[in-house]
Image: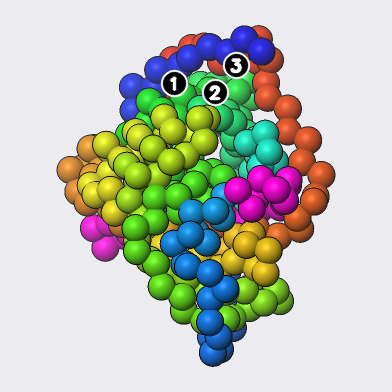
Amino acid sequence: MAQREHRWGGALAAGVVVCLGAGGCAGGAAAEGSPPTDPLDTLHRAADALVDAGTSRARTSMEMATGGTRVTIRGEGVYDFRHRLGRLTVTLPQDPAGTVEHRPITELLAPGALFMKNRGAGVPADKWVRVATATLSDGNLVTGGATDPFTAAEVLRGARTATYAGRTEVAGTEVRHYRGTADLALAAREAAEGGRGALAAAAKGFATTEVPFDVFLDETGRIRKVSHRFRFVNGHRDAVVDVSSTTLLYGFGAAADVRLPDAGDIYAGKIAEE
């Protein structure tokens, strides 16, 4: 499929950065238990376990805090881990005054690209906007308001420290809880070919390459929930922004027929700043 690149001039990042948000999914109380294998080895292989699983449903949440303001964005959809294709419906928060309702954004996730509908002033309703994720300073870990589920898993390939925190439950499933710190530069080197560019961009663009995480794996090693904490500098305000991104995976084996837009359906004009 032919695809055209599009240069934003910062419009997308500026728009979403102003209104990102988070959340999480509650787990039960931790119980005693020993990890089945070395924690680092287990986490380095977590993305491969998702590929073996094939597909799943996904819920995402992102919380951004800066200058005393805290906002939340949520997403829901499906993901095909074997082909690295996903579809999310992302809901933006209301404006601070609570008077403006934002239309949900449809996002299609693909290796090296993010497609969005209903994102960008002046874009026709039937057109998609395409962004090359390797050109974004955060590698689309933050910009789209939802971290690509497979990219979230591949961040764990860069885990440098990890501890086993015991057994608990996520959405009724018994899981093992691990926490630690990943290095984005290492994750980029260890990632599958389609994800290296985005993670390398994030390693250069974030305030630090260190990413603290909490992750919950089921008995087959699949991620059921993962939370990352990112820090970056908002170039528009020259302020450090703290972002907590959480991805919940469930319904493994669900249908995930994700079709990317044809070249003629991609908007090639200028995106107005909102």
Disc with the residue nearer the chain's start (3 vs 1): 3
Nearer to us of marks 1 and 2 is 2
- Dot 2: within a 10 Å radius of its alpha carbon, few (fewer than 14), some, or many (20 or more) residues? many
| Residue depicted at 26% across the width and 63% down the height | 68
Mark number, residue 271: 1
Label 2 sits on residue: 129
> Where is the N terminus found, in terms of image quarters?
top right
Q: Is residue 228 left or right of residue 222?
A: left
* Residue to which mark 3 is pinned: 266
Q: Disc 2 vs disc 3: Cβ atoms closer than 8 Å? A: yes
On the image, the x and y values in percent for residue 205 come to: 28, 38
Image quadrant in which the C terminus is located: top left
Circle 1 SS class: loop
- In the displayed structure, 114 sits above or below 238; it is above
Assign a secondary structure to mark 3: loop
In primary-sequence order, the first of circles 1 and 2 is 2
Amino acid type of the residue that numbered disc 3 sits on in the rendered structure: Ile
Q: CA distance from mark 3 to mark 1?
A: 12 Å
Query: Would you say the residues marked 1 and 2 are in contact, meaning their CB atoms lie under 8 Å apart?
Result: yes
Identify residue type, mark 2. Answer: Val
Position of 51 with respect to 31 (left or right) is: right
